[in-house]
Amino acid sequence: MKIAILGTGMVGETIASKLVELGHDVKMGSRTAGNEKAVAWVQKAGPRASQGTFADAAASAELIFNCTLGAGSLAALEAAGKENLKGKVLVDVSNPLDFSKGMPPSFFVSNTDSLGEQIQRAFPETKVVKALNTINASVMVEPSRLPGEHATFVSGNDADAKAQVKQLLTEGFGWKQVIDLGDITTARGTESYLALWIRLWGVLGTPDFNIQIVKKG
């Protein structure tokens, strides 16, 4: 499959590298072609890896991951181009975190809205699936780093899109528990969880942790 990764940070590089390892053709997109981080990643990742602008990456892709910082996600997706995103599945890994006043960050959208919803409203012909935004990058692609059948979540309006993402997460990344929370409004829950996740990171001293869902019966 041809997959675009929008974003050159740790999350984007980690997911991109895993997808190449799985045999996909992956193009990393950034604001400008020839981005230093993107070029360095291509050199490491091999012949299935390429890089270009956000628009370059989105145009050639069958599936797209938004791994940009939340504050810049809408602008990055606009740069990718509505026509290049039209009809495609967009896995949104971003969070609406505001680091302008340091740590811990605040949220620039919460409670009555979510960044996932904002993206879906801005790109109504794109199938937005919120996923993987509640865990550290290394755990996203290698859940076996942690013991037990801990959980990850998906939110989105399109059932087929969520099924496609769930298949990639289970068969590709190795997730055993992927919980479908419902439509894109449920992204409010997973995005809000970051307030707790950040504080747990501080207490535990590592970002390599996750939550396990247990229920009676």
Image: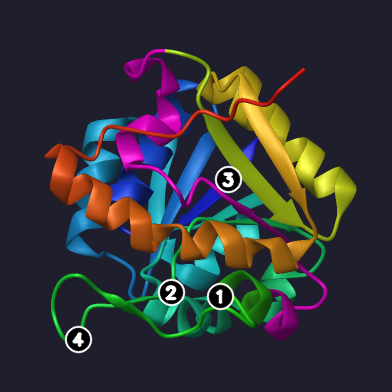
- Callout 3, which amino acid? Ile
Q: Is residue 138 magenta?
A: yes
The residue labelled by disc 2 is 96
Quadrant that contains the N terminus? top right
The answer to whether marks 3 and 1 mark residues whose Cβ atoms lie closer than 8 Å is: no
Q: Residue at x 80, y 48 (%)?
A: 161
The residue labelled by disc 4 is 100
The answer to whether marks 2 and 1 mark residues whose Cβ atoms lie closer than 8 Å is: yes
Outermost residue toward the front? 216
Quadrant that contains the C terminus? top right
Q: Which residues are magenta?
A: 120-147
Q: Is residue 110 magenta?
A: no
Outermost residue toward the right? 159
Q: Residue at x 25, y 74 (%)?
A: 105
Mark 4 vs mark 1, CA separation in Å: 17 Å
Mark 2 vs mark 1, CA separation in Å: 6 Å
Where is residue 135? Give x, y as percent: 40, 43
